[in-house]
Image: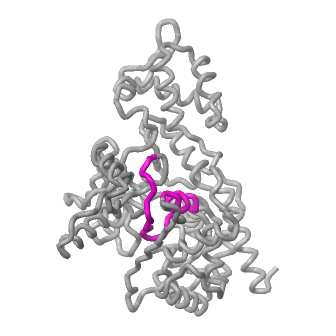
Amino acid sequence: MFTNSREECEAVCQELRSYAEYNHEPDRFLIHHGNLSPALRQTAEDAMKDEDANMTTCATATLELGIDIGQLESAFQLDAPFTVSGFLQRMGRTGRRGNPPEMHFVMREEHPESRAMLPDLIPWPLLQGIALVQLYLEEKWVEPPRTNRLPYSLLYHQTMSTLASSGEMTPAELASRVLQLAYFHNVSQDDYRTLLQHLLKTNQIERTPAGGLIVGMAGERVVNNYKFYAVFQDNEEYSVHSKSEELGTIVMPPPVGDKIAIAGRVWVVEDVDRQRHQVYCHEVKGRIPAYFGDVAGDIYPKILQRMRKVLNETQMYSYLQGNARARLTQMRDTANIAGLPDNQLINLGGKMWAFFPWTGSYQFLALERLLRIKCADRLNLRGFNSSRPYFMEFAMDCNEAEFFQIIQEEASKDFSSLDLLFLKEVPTFDKYDEYLPDELVRKEFADSVLDIAGMKKLVMQMALDYQRAHGQK
């Protein structure tokens, strides 16, 4: 039973065990995710390889690949995965005794409130699941690797591990050893010099009397930890506080200024204390999806584009069961009445609008920041909520034509990628970001996470489509 997050995995396993207990059935459910002890994970792996055991394991992406678990009879996916490759990896774990691979999607949604607005009437997991399947059936398409990253966290890791294993090295020797690795082809000599200067300042490395570099006192504590050689981030929890009240915990908190949902309410992040693992926030009105930090929500633009096409099509897909077919028909009727998907900006009443960019996570995030940082004053933007990468909701004082004109004008300007970061924002995501200078962390986010070039191209195309649809030149 695959889920998209650690929290969901725990909740599903608890629910299934409660169901078995209620029905006086034996506990036949196991669990496997990255936060569990090695012993518990090994227990689940051994049980799955046992041909005589009839067990169900609730898991996250930890069982997608790389672990021998035998051949499962079938897999269930709770809601849609975020990638075609993830869907194929999970389905590929099934099939035994000559049977073909088998995977079931279970799409859940609560009945929307009677006063719910348009975005909440769309079953996004169902739409996304159909798009993933169709992309593979029609084109055999899977996500290409992203090769334009500035992997400064990994650069720190390789620098420290090289010094730890090789001993004293001159800066030139260290640079030639590390920067020649293919993954660092986008890292400049200036960036590496900035990193080394910061590591010297923070005692991660030290300079010897002969001018060489060695691991420093602070660096020794890092490289001697048994977790050092795992380059991926551990799930470290942060406690969330509002004034004197503790609200709960999240993993990898979002940047200051972003919103989180916890304890049944919405909060704006005021500050993140990474030393004490604490998040400080204040309550605001609105509704956003809950975020606990370990959801891999990086979706390619092609998937969102195929989701838009699903709304426009009339065909019914053979793999859908009865309820899914009925829900798809209802979803298409609702979208057509509202003007979706042809129109990307939909008036929700008064000055409230919903914006559907139909693009991937990185372009969506860049577009969101363009609106909030570059366009907010001209639009008089307020009440901004985002459900990445599906839609944005906000109030503004402009009409549809003015909206597309303003975002086109702002996107066409020549500005630095760092202009789309908030003041004093240092968005750490990777395991060793805390040891990097702030300027490199900000640069990596701006140039690697925010797809500004793709966003600008998208804005120009949206503005052009609007002008054509309304007979403008």
Q: Relative to 103, say whether 215 is above or below.
A: above
Q: Quadrant of the C terminus?
A: bottom right
Q: Does the segment drawn in magenta span residue 427?
A: no
Query: Which of the 4 image quadrants contains residue 342?
Result: bottom right
- Furthest residue toward right: 473
Q: Which residues are magenta?
A: 67-93
Q: Position of residue 16 (x, y in %)?
A: 28, 69
Task: Give the colour scheme shown.
Answer: one colour
Q: Position of residue 408 (x, y in %)?
A: 70, 69
Residue 215 in sight in this render: yes
Q: Quadrant of the N terminus?
A: bottom left
The residue that appears at 61% across and 85% down in the rendered structure is 316
The residue that appears at 48% across and 32% down in the rendered structure is 157
104 or 310: nearer the viewer: 104
Q: Does the segment drawn in magenta span residue 75?
A: yes
Q: Is residue 267 left or right of residue 122?
A: left
Q: Relative to 413, say whether 111 is above or below.
A: below
Q: Position of residue 318 (x, y in %)?
A: 59, 81
The residue that appears at 29% across and 72% down in the rendered structure is 264
